[in-house]
Image (spheres, rainbow, N blue to C red):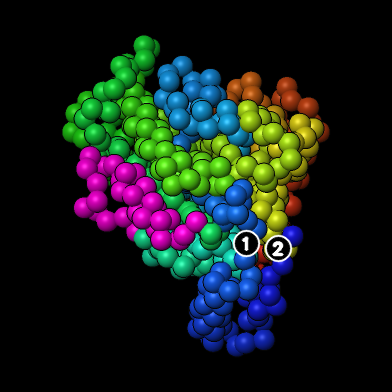
Amino acid sequence: MIRTSPLFQKHRRGILFGVKRRHQRALGRVLGLVATVCSALACDGGVRAAAGPGGGGRGVLVVAVDGLRADRLGVNGYARETTPTLDALAERGVRFTRVFAAAPLTRPAHVALLTGCDPTVALGEFQSDANDAAWNIPERVPALAVEFLAAGFRTAAFLDEAELIRSRGFDRGFQRVLVAEATDYRWGHRAEGQIARFAGWLRGVGSGASWFAYLHLSDLERSWSQPAPSWETYYPPLPGMDFVLPPGNTDSVFFAVPFSRWRGQARTLGAYEAAYDGHLNKLDADLDALFATLRRMGVDERTTVAVVGTHGVEFGEGGLYLRSGMFTLADLAVPLVLRPARGLESASLEGVVVDAVASTIDLAPTLLDLHGIARPAEMQGVSQRAALTDATARPREFAFASCGRLIGGAVFDARYCLESIAPAYAQPPLLRRAWFGEDEVDVSAGAAQRFYDHIATPFPALGATLDLTQPPPGFPVEDYTRLSEAWTRFEHDLTAARAAFGSIGGTE
């Protein structure tokens, strides 16, 4: 177990309780700077991270991919060979089959990965469209990069979208943050430039130092508005998907292609899906180049690699096309492939499949646990390390999702999902009109709840809503009650966490 100094323990837990509220933010920035400087000195002096094979430092690489659906990976049974590189990585490591994103939108999804906490703790104000909310990760919220930095690791983030760095707190714990420029890519592909930046930074770290890097790739999301012609038509459309999608005159739209993602021509659903798969295949080739870089630099075997989808993308499953934001499996079921560095576990972890329920907030505590770093008590995720070597281990019973385009959320267990949304409160009004087809909506009629077996029926009909006061017909009452009570506890715990962390809108 790597222990940190009292200074870092204080910084991690937040020593701002005794300071007047108007001075907390400024003091927090100072403390963060002090922690960064002290940890950097520790890397060069006394405290060092555990050495890898051959005496070199350990590496931890998180590759966070926006818009990556679990069901589009070949290793998960997809008909097309879209991801040979990811499939090979899974054969050399661990593949999780039931991972649910904590949020279906980009900013809150990254909050979950970077903090190991539900993203609601960083939501500035409760708004129906969380992607347009003011995001602020409070100083008291744990940060994965801070933990690695305190343990003697060099840290860097390579962000594919500037919107993340504009939100306060996303850079906490990173010694370097590099944001991709609009001129750094062609045909919407920035992955090659991101990988080159990462490789340049890693060469400067040195073979004896341990490091943690967060590599953000958003090429799949960008491909809708800036497609690469060769990958757009790499696959032919699948049969039976010849429905032409209508364009919307705004991005705030259901049941149509968002205006910013429509390219002025009639296209079928099959053509859009084929384009997604083509760009996914291109991204997979970029990942192959990334892993080849690790091998050439001689750090592959002592680097823990995690490739995770931040959120998915819909092709109409929840009423959206070519974007995410609802609480369906298309939005939330994401892949997680974890290849631990050699020597971290005594047992072989090649080709391991984990069927236990997991959340994206679990990645942070799992990585810390693998590297002998104590998980902060405030971190809400749980370590999945036990499930890597014990097929019967169930580190968590439920996974939760919130912070979508509509007020509400979802709770999943290994078989069932309870999903609740309130489209009558959708903002802006255009989004509400797109759902109901009219401007004036009876608020009491706007609540919708679905309870379903997500194994047998992964994408139930949108009209399959329920009486909120009754268990659904045909399902065991105890299962419905169990998930309903779990969601109630989740909401209560989030309210308490926001207050404890000093989130905007929380009360102390």
Give the camera-side residue of 219 and 386. 386
**Residue 496, image x, y percentages:** 70, 64
- Tell me the kind of residue under disc 2: Ile
Q: Quadrant of the N terminus?
A: bottom right
Give whichever of discs 1 and 2 has the lower sequence position.
2
Q: Please say whether residue 248 is one of the residues in the magenta stretch.
A: no
Circles 1, 2 touching at the beta carbon (< 8 Å): yes
Q: Name the residue that disc number 2 marks.
A: 2
Q: Residues within 10 Å of mark 2 (few under 14, many from 20)?
A: some
Q: Residues within 10 Å of mark 1 (few under 14, many from 20)?
A: many
**Residue at horizontal 59%, vertical 66%?**
152
- Which residue lies under the disc numbered 1? 49
**Compared with residue 197, is residue 326 higher up or lower down, i.e. above or below?**
above
Looking at the figure, which quarter contains the C terminus?
bottom right
In the drawing, what numbered circle is on residue 70?
none
Q: Position of residue 22 (x, y in %)?
A: 53, 86
